[in-house]
Image (tube, rainbow, N blue to C red):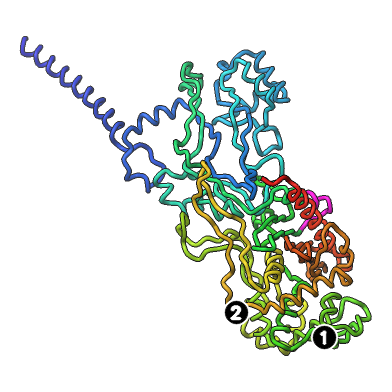
Amino acid sequence: MRNQRLKRIVLAASIISMIMFSYIGRLAWLQFMPGNVPTAALAHKSSRGAWQRMSVQQRQRKLVLDSGRGDFYDRYGTAITGESYSALAMFPVRQDRRGDETDIAALSRILGVTKEELMGKWNGLREPAFWKSDGLAQPLRLSESEALQVKELSLNGIRVLPYRNRYLSAFQPKHLIGFTSEHPEWLQAEQADDLAEGKRKLADQVGGSGLEKSLDKLLHGIGPTSVSYFLDGRNAPMHGLDMRITQPNNHYYPLKAMTTIDLQLQNEIEAYVDARGLKEGAVVVLDASNADIVAMVSRPQLKPGQFTSADGTEWENHALKAYAPGSIFKLVTEAAALEAGVVNQHESFYCDGEYGKYGLSCWKEGGHGHLTLAEGLAQSCNIVFATIAERLTPAELQRTADALGIGKPAGWHREQAFGPFQEPLRLLEEEESGQLFAAAGKQAAMLAAASDGTLAQSGIGQRDVRMSPLQAANLIVTLLNEGRVMEPRLLTDIRYANGQRMVKLPAQRAQAARGRIHPATAHALLRGMEAVVDHGTGLAIRQGLWAVAGKSGTAETMRAGIDRNHQWFAGYGPVKKPRYAIAVLVENQPPGSSNQATLIFRGVMDIAARLSSAADNLPKR
């Protein structure tokens, strides 16, 4: 009997011991073995403490307040992106634990919705979210009074929190800055190491265009600021824990990207072109001394988060796209003719309105009669420029175009890694190269150009010639600097959060593949542009705050099978001491309509003159 009892005791003890050891083993596995990692790249990494994190995650609901992404500033230190404001945060608390019905009704009145609408959105929450009014991409902005009223309510799962808005409400988003969006495929392809190390997440916002894209690897920062609201397994608040703010502990971030933009000038130009009814086109304003981009406006407007097309047309920067330039290319043709010595300033030409071949005619019915080369530029005579273009060889025209920076991206870039950039950097990745002859079969096209009318048509900016508004404005800067080609810069430096400089991006000249034009050639073209406004095709803009000079252009094109014109004007001002070079493009205008680009150029230059005068009159520090 005693032996049987002893055996039963030993058996029971063994079973209890096995159960205890199984629990101990389970706890050890949770403690020391990897948790549920999201990618194969992370599976090899140790995740000690994963069970603690998982248990916390089961009872907390996180809401990101600030992504930690770096912001952009204009040349005077004014913020272009990034503002914080009070917004209503909602957490998915179960309905019977939210609070008094009277307070819920008061909240609905503050938000301007019915109680049913409020409860409908709240009941539908699965994750924390900021309150957004219908039709708004960003959380509703609470006034100081509204925020105070919400704080006085006794509601669980409702908090007033600071929301970091990427795009400031005071003005429109900028194409040059670009936009951000979720792009997990790109992150997996380009940022696999950072994903594996937990530095980035697939849900992160990444740059989709503009500087947001070209500087994404620096700007994304070192982590978000988020708030945790603790709930139990039944979505009831865990009183005593309430909220916890988590943020990176590094005072050097987020970074500050300092641009060359004059934000006030940029915003005033945007308002002006919208008032003028510009639907498609661009305006580029460059510093005449070093080609820094002072303003860059593109239309249609950029509307982040409201894209509907799959081809990217809604966020294209039209200042960087290449179009047929029309008669502004006559500046290049005249430069090539002067450089090659096939014409002189005093030679006389005769225009009767028809060139006599290739179906080419002058824009002025009946022609201009007798006129010199300078007058040919002032009156934008097609016959004069077709004539001198056919005196050139294709190589001579191409050589001068190369020397003037035409036919390749103009924007600031580095071909080698430098500073914090571990690979080559181009600030304006979307910029199109432009061209003189067709890219396909270029050599063959050049050989045939002398006999098939290509030179005559190219000489007046038609056929296969393409140029972007940025390149057109930079052409003017090149002429003002006696043929020295600069690279338009959009960024001066990147700084840490404390203002200390991380890296400087200096103004720099372009690498000239074919040398430069002679200063005398540049001076002749500048005098010709003065004549354009004094008594030529730009006479309508002679009067204004500054004396200006420039060249108009009209390029024939087609849209959906219908004849249209691209209208241009590129020039500078003031004439005696140039401060700005400006290019304006108005796209897809009806044939025969007046040149809107010329009038917009005058208006933009007057805005620049007014703001410059106000700045000059400020007390010196």
- Residue bounds of the magenta highlight: 271-280
Position of 319 compared to 541: left or right?
A: left
Residue at image position (48%, 16%) is 239
Q: CA distance from mark 1 to mark 2?
A: 27 Å
25 and 396: which is toward the camera:
396
From the top left corner, tell me how far across and down residue 318 is, in percent.
70, 60
What label does residue 425 carry, if any? none
> How dense is the environment of label 1, judged by Cα within 10 Å: few (below 14), some, or many (20 and up)?
few
Badge 2 marks a residue whose secondary structure is loop
Say whether residue 275 is magenta. yes
Residue at image position (46%, 54%) is 420
306 and 407: which is toward the camera:
407
Q: Examine the rendering and report whether any part of residue 392 can be seen.
A: yes
Position of 83 compared to 465: left or right?
A: left
149 and 287: which is toward the camera:
287
Say whether residue 611 is magenta. no
* Residue 156 picture quarter: top right
From the top left corner, tell me how far across and down residue 583 is, in percent.
74, 63
Q: Quadrant of the C terminus?
A: top right
Amino acid at dot 2? Arg
Badge 1 marks a residue whose secondary structure is loop
Amino acid at dot 1? His
Marks 1 and 2, the one that precedes in the sequence: 1
Say which residue label 2 marks.
Answer: 514
In the depicted structure, whether residue 95 falls above or below residue 191: above
Say which residue label 1 marks.
Answer: 346
